[in-house]
Image (cartoon, rainbow, N blue to C red):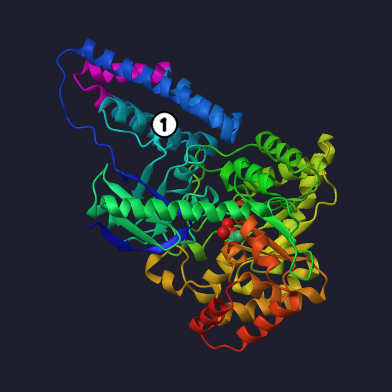
Amino acid sequence: MGTLLHGIAASPGIGMGRVFLYHAARVSTGDRLVRDQAEEWERYRCAVERFCGELREKAARVVSVAGQAQADILLSQIAMARDPSLEEAVKAQIASRQSAETALDAACAQFISSLLESENEVIRLRAVDVQDLRDRLLRILLDLPETDFSALSPDTVLIADALPPSAMTALASHPIAAIVFCKDGKASHSVILARAMEIPTVVGAGDAASQVRDGEWAVVDGTAGTVLLSPTEEQLRESERKRKAYLRGREQLNTYIHRPAVTADRFPIRLTAGVGSEGEIRQAWKYGCDGIGLLRSEFLYLDRPTLPGEEEQFHVYSAFTRIVEGKPLVIRTLDIGGDKRLPGLSWEQEKNPFLGCRGVRLYREQEEMFRTQLKAILRAGAYGDVRLLIPMVTGLEELRWVKAVLAECKEELQSRGEAFSLEMPLGAMVETAAAALTVDLLAGEADFLSIGMNDLTQYILAVDRDNVKVSHLYSHYDPALLRSIRQIFSCGKKTGVPISVCGQAAADPLFLPLLLGLGAEELNVQPSFLLSARRALAQWTREEAASLAEQALKLKTEAEVCALLEENRR
Ligand code: PEP
Ligand code: MG
């Protein structure tokens, strides 16, 4: 009998395959002394050649998913690896009988400390490039496997404590069978990416990593939240049967492709997609939707040592306007902080990052970075229906500050003679308790609002969305959330400002009728949920949904709300 572990269902579906255990390890160089210096230099040169070859291959793969600009960043490391001053420094160390790896480490340490001493921030940021180069070269020299997630075979079950969102992007073009995160909470950004890629995922699977070895079989049920380690032949056959049944269910959903999103009484609901990459926009377009209601722009900033410039961003956003063919493209400005860090930005450690310098709060500190993004978005607005959305807003002052900066960006673009959107709609995320309580004030000065249920749940309930210890408390069924949504719609709607709902709750087929009953007319879901959302909408009239909401609002606990919704599952 295999070992069955219970975790938390995070991305639906069943995946089985061979386990790949991922440990983020530090590379240590050892202290081997060298006899033959020429041979050691040759070792170093071969490592650099291999590094450059691998980088070219990776860049070719990155072009198709993330575009040329991302690939160019990878390629710039080739020039760095061949930099004559680095070569000289390594050579000098080897001449004093150091091994190639110790020589490289010492040479890079010199470079890193001199870069870090610079007054110029751009130069300081280059230290990250050198560290990355050093680590990758060291792995080649020491014959340590570099974790190239894109090289994993499709039948891999990846088991890791947690992964940074940047590592997940490598799986976008090379999906694997399933993922198990021992630690990550179900609303972490890595899990959101896993869902977007339709990779069955279980989180909070405790000590899964210590109970299995690389290459052993595992079955992950991302719908039930279980992980079966070392299954028997019989269990494997049974799991394969379940997997096929799940896939057949998905096939039935395909009848909803490109159908309009309407309730059972034919009331049209705007159904938009929430995306974080070009691949996801294409996926949304395959299923059909009313536009991109939330483009998480972080993908442009992650997984690279420097920040993207205005031209690069403009090219990406304007290319997206061509894909969406005149439908709205809501670009959310960078939402960094919380669980996301940028390699290209120096960062002070914060005790409570989700309550710290996140989203709009960071823009005052990094105003140039914010202005660069605003200008790129404004320029893309000349090519389509582009709208701006600001994350993590807690009050009107922030929105007013953004408006003032936006006005200055427009002036600058005007003086440069650039084409841009003069009247771009500006929206605010309602995802903090403060925003929810002052939604009438925000609605008075925003063109649209978007309820971010993932964060609203976190901030209303004071439950860290990534902390598996409290993830049983993280639930949008909580009466506090229902009251909050009711208050947002009743206050916001008086102003006539459109309000959409995004986050995992909007795609939950049990919760969706409740949102409908509370007044939602626009829902934003990940592309993989567009079809199931349409099916759920088609099963409810507005009157039935309103009555369900009325009953739910009378309940006193999360469990009662959950039971009511289960009873009404269709
Ligand atoms: C949300 O908070 O619900 C949301 C849509 O944004 P994110 O998950 O990217 O924080
Ligand atoms: Mg959010």
Q: Could you say which quadrant of the image residue 523 lies in? A: bottom right
* Residue 549 sits above or below residue 229 on the image: below
- From this view, report whether residue 561 is shown above or below residue 345: below
Along the viewing direction, whichever of 409 and 133 lies nearer the viewer: 133
Query: Depth check: 444 or 176 in front?
Result: 176
- Where residue 344 sits: x, y (%)? 51, 41
- Residue pictured at 47% horizontal, 61% vertical: 353
Residue 215 position in % (x across, y down): 27, 41
Please state if 66 lies on the left or on the right of 149 as rendered. right
Q: Along the line of sight, which residue is nearer the eye, 12 or 28?
A: 12
On the question of residue 336 being in view, the answer is no
Residue position marked by numbered label 1 in the rendering: 130
Give how far across and how far down residue 268 sits, in percent: 79, 64
Residue 428's image quarter?
Answer: bottom right
Q: Residue at x 23, y 54 (%)?
A: 211
- Helix, strand or loop under label 1: helix
Few, some or many C-alpha atoms within 10 Å of disc 1 (few <14, some 14-19, many ≥20)? many
Q: Nearer the viewer, residue 122 or 253?
A: 253
Name the image quarter holding the C terminus. Answer: bottom right
Judged by its main secondary structure, the magenta piece is helix
The quarter in which the N terminus is drawn is bottom left
Q: Let me know if residue 99 is in the magenta part.
A: yes
Q: Which residues are magenta?
A: 84-103
Q: Is residue 99 visible?
A: yes
Q: Is residue 514 above or below residue 417?
A: below
Residue 44 drawn in magenta: no
Q: Identify the amino acid type marked 1.
A: Val
